[in-house]
Image (cartoon, rainbow, N blue to C red):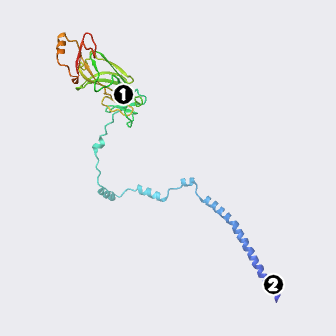
Amino acid sequence: MATAITYQRRTRFTRIVLLLIVLIALLSVVAVASPLTQKIRARQDDENLPSSADIEDSDPPAEQNSLDAVGETQPDPIESATATEMTPPILINKSALLTSPAPAPEASATKSSSPSSTVISGSNSTNIIIGADPRKAASRLSLTKPKPNQASPPIFALGNPIEFAWEFDNATLSIPPANLTLQVTLNTDATKIWPIANISGAATSYTWNTANIITPSNLLTGMYTLNIFDAKIGKLGVANGGQLMSNSDLRFGLYVPVCPSLDSLQSWEKGPIPSRSKRNYALSISTNLLYPDSTCFYFGVL
């Protein structure tokens, strides 16, 4: 009896061990077969994907075909008439369509003598100098001969040459003028202007011969103002940074030398002394203070 029970137990144990061995073997097979299955599926997916050539050769989708068919169909005349009645009319200005805008004036670019500037001028435009910086101050020149003196301006005899000299501020003059214009204006009548010369922009002096000046009229006895300015900008033009601004600092007088007769000289010596406040200048032969001369008596009323 005991032997039979022992045999049954051994048989059960053996079966359990065999089942465990079979289960372990199955799990091992599944573990090994899982990566292989994934590779096989990946290959199948790659084989099932369509190529680019197949995509290009394939027919367009049904939705696109349906849209094309709808576009080719003609609209219902009733619906189109209704849409036309509901849409407000659009006003078109025929004159605006027929008339074209006037063409802009053609501009021609010309280079001035300044290396860093270009003058652009058109038929209806003003001169514009490219290269001037409006943020900087304009440059000034200084008169050195004769020097400006507002309290006692210099005076010159008509018919004699007058030398004017000046100097530039090279630190601020980055766009030097191509030409300088010199002119004088009568202080009592600014409309009377006598042109002196149009010279090179690099000049620093000029001698004006006042003899036989008849343009626009003979020079008159009186006070004058010398104007020196860039010929491109003009006397009343606005100079930007680096350009030369107009200079009108020098005021001077012109008088006529006279050699009076003895009678007129004696009558003048007996008369009242001319007032200097009225800018009367006189010189007799005996004093020889301002304009020494052995024969002539100089008299000018300024």
- Residue type beneath disc 2: Tyr
Mark toward the viewer: 2 or 1: 1
- Residue type beneath disc 1: Leu
Asked if residue 55 lies left or right of residue 120, the reply is right
What residue sits 70% from the left and 71% below the top?
Answer: 27
Q: Is residue 63 above or below residue 250?
A: below
Q: Is residue 108 visible?
A: no
Please say if the residues under marks 2 and 1 sit with CB atoms less than 8 Å apart.
no
Quadrant hosting residue 208: top left
Give the mark nearer the N terminus: 2 vs 1: 2
- Which of the two residues, 95 or 253, is positioned nearer the viewer here? 253
The residue that label 1 is drawn on is 141
State how many labels appear: 2
Q: Is residue 269 visible?
A: yes
- Which of the two residues, 37 or 116, is positioned nearer the viewer here? 116
Residue 255, given in percent of the width and then of the height, sits at 24, 18
Residue 291, given in percent of the width and then of the height, sits at 28, 15
Disc 2 is placed on an element classified as: helix
What residue sits 74% from the left and 75% below the top?
Answer: 20
Q: Which mark is residue 7?
A: 2
Disc 1 is placed on an element classified as: strand
Residue 39, given in percent of the width and then of the height, sits at 66, 61
Residue 171, given in percent of the width and then of the height, sits at 42, 30
Asked if residue 33 lies left or right of residue 136, the reply is right
